[in-house]
Structures are given as structure tokens and as C-alpha cells.
Amino acid sequence: METYGLHHYPGRLFVVEGVDGSGKSTQIALLRHWLISEGYTVFFSEWNSSPLVKKTTSRGKRKQLLTPTTFSLIHATDFADRTEHDIIPPLKAGAIVLADRYIYTAFARDVARNVDRQWVRELYQFAVQPTRAFYFRVPLDVSLNRILTGRTELKYYEAGMDLGLSSDPRQSFTLFQQRIVDEYEAMVNEFDLTIMDATLPIPEQQRLMRRLVQPHLAGVRRLRPPLPEKVLENIAHSLEISHGAKNQGLR
Ligand SMILES: Nc1ncnc2c1ncn2[C@@H]1O[C@H](COP(=O)(O)OP(=O)(O)OP(=O)(O)O)[C@@H](O)[C@H]1O
Ligand SMILES: [Mg+2]
């Protein structure tokens, strides 16, 4: 596998990063639909989604068996499996790969759990460097409000309760997420992350994201010409409704 350095595959790799509730999945879903409508072949890969580790992770979480190091190794296993099966083959074939969370999530979360900064970077040195990595920067009170809309409870590991920072899940979540934010902020220069103002309205962020992605699409093969404007408007309309951005004019 390629190491960190720039890959030489014909495809492109775009990744989204940021704390829980910063709007990553919303934006990458919209980007994906746009790229497909433009005629590109798009693959999508999500953090911690490999069937290889699913059972182990949920069992470990349910029984609270996971130390920060085992957590880190499980996520690296998941990532290695997805890199080999879901990321490198489409890049080799000249497709566009979109990743919802990437190595920076491990670097931020594991270090927030006191894993050694250098150790975790070395663990992931087989990763392919993204064409562009977007970091969704958002104040913690905004992201907390977003993820608590529609539910009242925070999950044990999500709130960083395993760290013993506070017995109050909300307080623990805030302290844990602040550590994660500090790591992300330090990585902006280290890994040349592209900062997105994640407090902006959904359509505005999406317009910006497309503008930043566009220059990287030169030379990428399309399966077919872009869809007609009318069809695009219909797709945008249905997406706006499903993402609560109705009437804000995405296109
Ligand atoms: N710019 C925005 N303004 C207001 N609400 C937003 C914005 N972006 C996303 N949301 C809403 O915030 C919630 C979280 O968004 P989303 O699931 O995209 O975040 P995420 O970064 O993927 O979170 P996680 O890391 O937990 O998967 C959703 O209900 C979404 O509709
Ligand atoms: Mg998400």
C-alpha cells in the first residue's frame, strides 16, 4: 500500500472531518449526489463500518471492555480493511472516493483518550493521502445542540465517559469534545486541512464545498454527461427537504 505521501492513482479522494454534529454527513451526502449528477463514478466509505470489526466493536462497547489502545487498534483494523477493499480499488480505477471521517478522526479521538500522538500516526502510515480533507469547524455548544435534537441521551463512549472526566454525561461530552477540537485545530497546519465554517447554512457550505472540489475534477473520467438542469433542480429540491434546508436555495 501507499504510505501517507501523495498517491499516484487516477482517482480522487475527498474526506470530511470534525466533531460529532458538525455537519459532515450532511455535506458529504450532498456532495455525493452532485458528483453523481455530474456523471462521475462515486464510492463512499464511512468510519468504523467494516463488517470485519463490527461485532467486536459493539460487544466491546456494550460491555465497556475497551481501553483506549484496543479502541485505537480496532479502528485501525477497520480502516485498513476499508482502505484495501473500498478505497484503493476505486482510486486505481479512476473513480471519486468520499470518506465520512478519515485518519484525522483517529488522531483526534485517540490522542484525546491519551494515546501517544506519534504512535497513532505511525499506526496509520499505510493510509492514502486525501486529495482534499475538509475540517468542519463549529463551536461545541452548536454541535451539542444539533446532536441532542431528537434525543436526550449521549452514548457512553460518545461522551468520553470511559475517561472519567466527569460523571455527568453532558459535562464529560463537552470536556472530551474540547480535547478533540484542540487536536483538530493542531492538525490544520500539520495536514493542510481545509477549514469549513460549519455554522453557515447547509446550502451555503455546500456551494463552497463544490467550488473547492471542482478544480480537482479536471481530467477525471465521467461515465456520462451531466444531467439536465431540470433533473438537478429536482434532486436538489428533494435533498433540501430531507436535510431540513428547504427554501434555502441550494443551486
Ligand atoms: N449547517 C447546519 N446548520 C444547522 N443544522 C445542521 C447543519 N448541518 C447539519 N445540521 C444538522 O445537524 C445534525 C448533525 O448533522 P450531521 O449528521 O451531518 O453531523 P455529523 O458531523 O455527520 O455528525 P456525527 O459525527 O455525529 O456523524 C443533523 O440533524 C443535521 O440536519
Ligand atoms: Mg455523521
Image (spheres, rainbow, N blue to C red):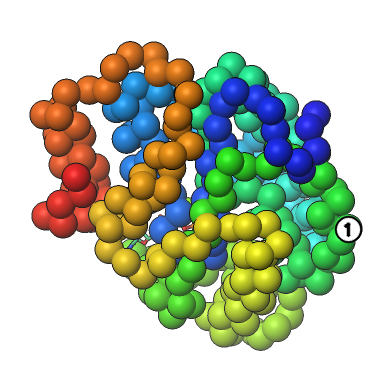
Examine the rendered structure and indicate whether residue 130 appears above or below residue 196.
Answer: above
The percent coordinates of residue 119 (x first, y second) are: 88, 58
Identify residue for label 1: 119
The percent coordinates of residue 212 (x first, y second) are: 42, 48
Label 1: state its secondary structure. Answer: helix
The residue sitting at 74% across, 52% down in the picture is 60
The percent coordinates of residue 227 (x first, y second) are: 22, 22
Res 67 → quadrant: bottom right
The residue sitting at 52% across, 23% down in the picture is 95
Q: Callout 1: 10 Å neighbours few (<14), some, many (20+)?
A: few
Q: Is residue 228 visible?
A: yes
The percent coordinates of residue 114 (x first, y second) are: 81, 71
Q: Nearer the viewer, residue 108 or 34?
A: 34
Q: Give the residue type that dot 1 points to.
A: Trp
Residue 62 is left or right of residue 95, and the answer is: right
The residue sitting at 60% across, 78% down in the picture is 178
Examine the rendered structure and indicate whether residue 47 appears above or below residue 87.
Answer: below
Examine the rendered structure and indicate whether residue 192 appears above or below residue 218.
Answer: below
Examine the rendered structure and indicate whether residue 169 appears above or below residue 194.
Answer: below
The residue sitting at 36% across, 47% down in the picture is 211
Residue 43 is left or right of residue 64, and the answer is: left
Q: Is residue 148 visible?
A: no
